[in-house]
Image (tube, helix red, strand yellow):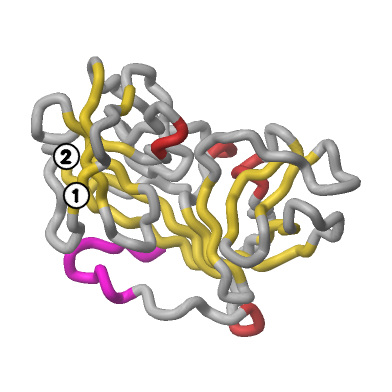
Amino acid sequence: MLTLGASAVTATGAPAVAHRASATRVIVVRPVNASGHAEPGFPITSGGRYPIDCRFPTPSAGAVSPNIEFCFPTALSAVACWKAAAPHKALCMRDPRSHQLTRFGRTGRFAPTGLAPADQRAPLSIVLGDGDHCEIRAGGAWSSPPGHPHLVGYYSCVHDGAVWAHLGALHNGINESQPLWTVRTAHFNDRNLVTRRVVRAYFVGTATHQTTKL
């Protein structure tokens, strides 16, 4: 497992190609410390005038440290948020590959939050063997691909459409039964599902916090 901090923010490199990857590379990005301050190398942008709600202990699926929440509303894609040192603020990472944090105003308290159950943990972002990357779904109404009404979308991909699996699938539809993880992708208007390899998987943690075994 590779942990990225201030000294390694540019060390991720290009996606590995599928035929060279023997196992999925798990990367943990740690942009915020336990006191709620951003680590060096993680710039902060404003989330705008709409606040987020982190009152409910909803652990981020991509968190390997406690007190990293999925906050609401889902339209703001606050998929992994820390209580900020500044009052009534939260620092959120939407895409761990970008090393960009977003500062949101926060309504109410920030609930103490544990980890998601082990079989429900899933990376916030994945890189596939064909070089495409996919981001975890935050919400919204998605239709199923033609001919597969039982499938739901778990990740949105730039080129490959989406990652599909049964409702309630473990690890957000990522098959982790082998060292090299796989997913099934298809475009929204395509009934042909393609099995693709996951060469990189990005999780988040709190800086200086001991890594949790995935």
Q: Residues within 10 Å of mark 2 (few under 14, many from 20)?
A: some
Using the image as rendered, state which of residue 74 and residue 22 is in the foreground: 74
What residue is disc 2 on?
A: 34
Kindly indicate the quadrant of the structure image that contains residue 171. top right
Give x and y (percent) for residue 5: 23, 61
Q: Residues within 10 Å of mark 1 (few under 14, many from 20)?
A: few
Q: Is residue 171 left or right of residue 121?
A: right
Circles 2 and 1: CB distance less than 8 Å? yes
Q: Is residue 50 left or right of residue 74?
A: left
Give x and y (percent) for residue 82: 25, 36
Residue mark closest to the camera, 2 vs 1 = 2
User: Is 5 covered by the magenta stretch?
Assistant: yes
The segment highlighted magenta reads 1-11
Give x and y (percent) for residue 47: 26, 41
Helix, strand or loop under label 1: loop
Residue type of the residue flagged with mark 1: Thr
What residue is disc 1 on?
A: 208
Above or below — where is 183 with respect to 7?
above
Residue farthest toward the bottom in the current orientation of the protein: 20
Helix, strand or loop under label 2: loop
Residue beneath the point at 54% across and 35% down: 139
User: Is 127 covered by the magenta stretch?
Assistant: no
Q: Which mark is residue 175?
A: none
Kindly indicate the quadrant of the structure image that contains residue 85. top left
Residue beneath the point at 42% across and 40% down: 77
Above or below — where is 120 with respect to 107?
below
Residue type of the residue flagged with mark 2: Ala
Q: Is residue 93 left or right of residue 187?
A: left
Using the image as rendered, state which of residue 207 and residue 43 is in the foreground: 43
Residue farthest toward the right in the current orientation of the protein: 147
Above or below — where is 105 with respect to 211?
above
Residue beneath the point at 27% across and 28% down: 51
